[in-house]
Image (cartoon, helix red, strand yellow):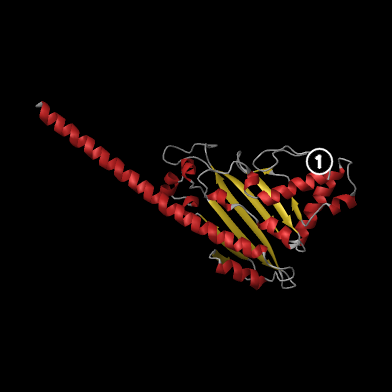
Amino acid sequence: MPMRALIRRAGVYVWHTLVCLSALAFVLSLFWSISYILSIRQRRQAEQMLHQLAALPLGTTDFSTIQRIARNSGGREDCTVEPCRYDFDDRFMFADSWLPRVLRRTEWDYVGLRPWQLSVFIRKRTDGLADIDVIALVGRGRGWLENEGLLSGNEWALWEVFLNTSAKGFDDAFEREEKDILNYGIRTREQIKQSVGGLIVSQPQPGSKGAGEVLYLHLSPNALPDIRNVAFNLNLHCATAISPCRHLCQVAPAAWHEYVRFLQSNGLSVGQTPECGITESR
């Protein structure tokens, strides 16, 4: 084969390779752009709903009011006779079919695309009012716990924040915290009670996966507006930020600082970090 023909054929192969790589880059960029825009749109809808739920005045948390707020915010509705659930999330990144498993690799975390979900559960009480549960999940990438194969990607860890607004949930959480603090012999029951502002933040717990963590928030139905704002102030920017959140406390920063205040007011030591003000406690 003449040299000129060989060079021409090699040039064709190189050109085809460049075209294929460019097409692949275009498809991936298009996927990222669409997914990222949809994720941000869902995040803003969820943030709007949280802001409106936090602004509800005391004594008006009836079922229909909360349902109207959640429904108007654009969440997917799933209702039975009384309980209702509203979901906001990056649905594609949470899907479990073959193609999404290929595209949901934890490497997408480097460009701000990660699985996340915010769910609101509304339960009607006998007095006509309602209790609210809010569950926020944010994927944690930059590495993995278990590689599921070349085409399947890696396993995401999850940061989880659970917010409960029932009176029983608050009382039970306070009782657990009171018992724990009394074991140190530093404070009396009355002093502990006075240090509670209407929000109990439990000590973070390990998640179901090794790199995951869970934070439980218990809000009193009688909490003042500023405390309600603290409880509902979830930082959903962690779900879409190009530079990722690196600590669980960044998902619920206001509640985390309330946690620090409560511990310090009861004579317990905390370890400080620039990001949130605490990494270890007790």
Question: In the rendered image, which quarter contains the C terminus?
Answer: top right
What residue do we see at 48% from left, 50% from top?
Answer: 93
What residue do we see at 49% from left, 55% from top?
Answer: 39
Residue 128 position within the rendered picture, expressed as x and y whole percent measured from the top left: 72, 73
Residue 253 position within the rendered picture, expressed as x and y whole percent measured from the top left: 66, 49
Q: Is residue 165 visible?
A: no
Please name whichever residue, 10 or 260, is drawn nearer the observer in this view of the structure: 260
- Tell me which amino acid carries mark 1: Leu
Please name whichever residue, 35 or 273, is drawn nearer the observer in this view of the structure: 273
Q: Is residue 16 left or right of residue 222?
A: left
Residue 28 position within the rendered picture, expressed as x and y whole percent measured from the top left: 37, 46
Q: Residue furthest front?
A: 274
What residue do we see at 85% from left, 54% from top?
Answer: 194
Please name whichever residue, 54 or 146, is drawn nearer the observer in this view of the structure: 54
Q: Is residue 245 visible?
A: yes
Q: Residue furthest left?
A: 2
Residue 82 position within the rendered picture, expressed as x and y whole percent measured from the top left: 65, 70
Q: For mark 1, what is the residue?
A: 268
Q: Is residue 204 left or right of residue 34?
A: right
Numbered marks: total:
1
Please name whichever residue, 267 or 137, is drawn nearer the observer in this view of the structure: 267
User: Circle 1: is it few (<14), some (14-19), or many (20+) Cα within 10 Å?
Assistant: some
The image quarter containing residue 48 is bottom right
Check the image and report above or below for 24 versus 40: above
Question: In the rendered image, which quarter contains the N terminus?
Answer: top left
SS under mark 1:
loop
